[in-house]
Image (cartoon, rainbow, N blue to C red):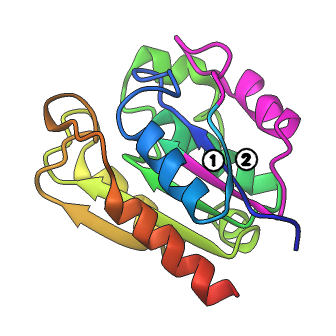
């Protein structure tokens, strides 16, 4: 296996790789020997699939890559895994519908049904983080993703959308979950 790489994929409201917990996760995973990419994604106001999926390919996402996506970034990770083999993914604040929001409808991610089986088959693991007090994503959305993908699932009651009022510049639970998966794979 090539050296393991992680790509951090922000959401449409926190589209900078310097926001929230992303710098912490980058630094901690690098300490564990991973190469971590935290690029500025194109088309950040809408985060359209037609730009983000090719961008992930341009970054070299492959069977040695862990995609770590927050919100819309989690959606991009799932859609990428439908048609591409990756090592694994971490979905933070994920969902599966357009939530009735116009920007989500414009993103292109929700124009077709999900191929849950392909997403599962194209990676070795899927870790998911959700919170019952998420102000943007109803917990039923996250639970449906968990059910369909049989994710390693962590549900909190006090993390919100993992940004904003519940902002924490660290995310040790994510780093530990990834580290544990990598130990299992070795």
User: Is residue 182 shown above or below 167?
Assistant: below
Query: Which quadrant: the C terminus?
Result: bottom right
Residue 64 in sight: yes
Query: Which quadrant: the N terminus?
Result: bottom right
| Position of residue 138 in the picture relative to residue 153 (left or right) | left
Q: Position of residue 125 (x, y in %)?
A: 60, 74
Q: Position of residue 57 (x, y in %)?
A: 85, 39
Q: Residue 2 is drawn in which quadrant? A: bottom right
Q: Position of residue 26 (x, y in %)?
A: 53, 46
Residue 183 part of the magenta-drawn span: no
Q: Residue 51 is drawn in which quadrant? A: top right
Element under label 2? helix
Q: Residues within 10 Å of mark 1 (few under 14, many from 20)?
A: many
Which residue matches tag 2?
A: 80
User: Is residue 29 shown above or below 149?
Assistant: above
> Which circle marks residue 88 in the picture?
none
Numbered range of the magenta stretch: 39-68
Residue drawn at (59%, 85%), measured in percent from left and top?
183
Residue drawn at (48%, 24%), measured in percent from left and top?
104
Cα separation between marks 1 and 2: 5 Å
Residue drawn at (62%, 40%), measured in percent from left and top?
76
Residues 49 and 67: in front is: 67
Residues 102 and 75: in front is: 75
Residue 41 part of the magenta-drawn span: yes
Element under label 1? helix
Decide: marks 1, 2 in contact (CB < 8 A)?
yes
Which residue matches tag 1?
A: 77
User: Is residue 132 shown above or below 76?
Assistant: below
User: Is residue 24 shown above or below 5?
Assistant: above
Residue 113 in sight: no
Q: Residues within 10 Å of mark 2 (few under 14, many from 20)?
A: many
| Position of residue 45 in the picture relative to residue 162 (left or right) | right
């Amino acid at each position: 296996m090539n050296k393991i790489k992680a790509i951090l994929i922000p959401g449409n409201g926190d589209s900078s790789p310097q926001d929230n917990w992303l710098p912490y996760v980058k630094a901690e995973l690098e300490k564990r020997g991973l190469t971590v990419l935290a690029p500025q994604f194109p088309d950040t106001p809408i985060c359209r699939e037609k730009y983000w999926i090719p961008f992930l390919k341009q970054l070299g996402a492959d069977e040695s890559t862990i995609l770590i996506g927050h919100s819309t970034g989690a959606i991009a990770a799932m859609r990428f895994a439908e048609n591409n083999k990756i090592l694994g993914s971490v979905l933070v604040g994920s969902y599966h519908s357009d939530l009735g929001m116009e920007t989500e409808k414009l993103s292109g991610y929700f124009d077709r049904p999900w191929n849950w089986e392909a997403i599962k088959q194209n990676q070795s693991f899927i870790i998911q983080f959700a919170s019952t007090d998420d102000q943007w994503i109803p917990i039923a959305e996250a639970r449906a993703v968990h059910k369909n993908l049989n994710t390693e699932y962590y549900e909190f009651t006090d993390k919100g959308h993992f940004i904003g009022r519940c902002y924490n510049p660290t995310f040790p639970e994510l780093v530990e979950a990834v580290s544990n998966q990598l130990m299992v794979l070795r």
